[in-house]
Each structure stands twice: as structure tokens, then as C-alpha cells.
Image (tube, rainbow, N blue to C red):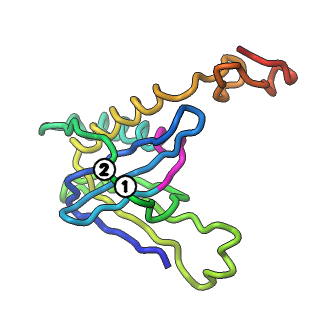
Amino acid sequence: MSESFDFEQPDFFTAGAIGNPGERVFYLQAREGGSAITLKCEKGQVKSLGDYLAGLITKLGAPKGKVPTQMDLLDFAEPAWIVATLGVGYDDENDRIIVEAHELFEEEEEGQRAGEEPASARVRITREQAQAFVTRAAELMKGGRPNCPVCSEPMDTSGHICRRSNGHIVH
């Protein structure tokens, strides 16, 4: 059974990627005191979370405190688990944005994990941490492969076979 996490006042929240464009592996990280978590996720999840948090900050109002600038991944050995879904909420009483992740159960493991619930991670971040995450997510997206102008799929340096152009290579 995978471990669940609940960070009330994390001092660190970020996303990062390891590897070359087209082969990068994405991670979310949070730390509170001496406890830290690293979760493996998809590029699209980081982008969507960054986009959503940007809109939420616009609605809630800009952060008034210092926005963190140290957003590089912390050293880690292995991620705790793989993220299946992400959700976002808001705690009005404490002025915290709640980011919640749920574990992906791999199909081949389902039989071995019958009766178990997927792990979850709940991280309550400040507006400042959310703003820093938005900036970090945008930087990570710029570091990826360019998108095809025809189908919007990522292209390698040699181009790619585009489904929308009947299998022709687009450069």
C-alpha cells in the first residue's frame, strides 16, 4: 500500500523535469519540515495545474508576500507513486489553495491491490507558492519540443509524421 501525505503548511512546492526534451519525466514535489514527497506525473498535468492556478490567482488576487524563487527539484531517490488525477480547491478560512493528487493504480497491479484505496497527497499552498508554481510550469513548458503547426502534437528536431496531413512529415 502506498503512503498518503497531508501537508498543512508546506515550505516548498514545485514541479520539475529530468531528461532531454521528448524524453523528460515530470515530477511534483512538496516539503513540510523534515518530510518531503516526490510524485511522478505527466507534462500535461503540470501544464494544466499551472494554467488553473494562474486563473485562480487572478480571481483571488495577487500574492502580497514574497514569491519563492528557488524552484529546482530537491534530490530524491524514487517517486512515492504516479499521479492519476489532480484536483484544486480553496480554503477561504486559511487563505490556502489545496492541491490534491491521487495515485494511479497500474492495471497489472489491480489484482494484487484488491480492496486497497489509491494513495493521495493534499498540499495546502499559499498564493505566493501558487504564483511561483505558475512561473515554474511555464518555464518547463518552454523547455519542451515545439508543437506541430498543423496538429499541435510535439515535433522532434527531424519533424514528425502528422496525422492531420495524411501521414506526411512536417518540419
**Residue at x-position 64% and y-position 20%:** 157
| Image-quadrant location for residue 147 | top right
Amino acid type, mark 2: Leu
Residue 25 x %, y %: 52, 45
Residue behind mark 2: 74
- Answer with mark 2 or mark 1, whichever residue precedes in sequence: 2
Residue 132 x %, y %: 27, 38
Asked if labels 1 and 2 touch by Cβ distance under 8 angstroms, the answer is no
Would you place residue 105 above or below residue 94 in this image?
Answer: below
- The kind of secondary structure element at disc 1 is strand
**Residue at x-position 41% and y-position 39%:** 50
Would you place residue 53 above or below residue 33 in this image?
Answer: above
Would you place residue 131 above or below residue 45 in this image?
Answer: above
| Image-quadrant location for residue 109 | bottom right
Question: Start and end of the magenta stretch?
Answer: 40-48
Is residue 87 within the magenta segment?
Answer: no
Residue behind mark 1: 99
In this view, the residue farthest toward the left is 65
| Image-quadrant location for residue 60 | top left
**Residue at x-position 31% and y-position 37%:** 59
- The kind of secondary structure element at disc 2 is loop
**Which residue is nearer to you in this view: 62 or 83?**
83
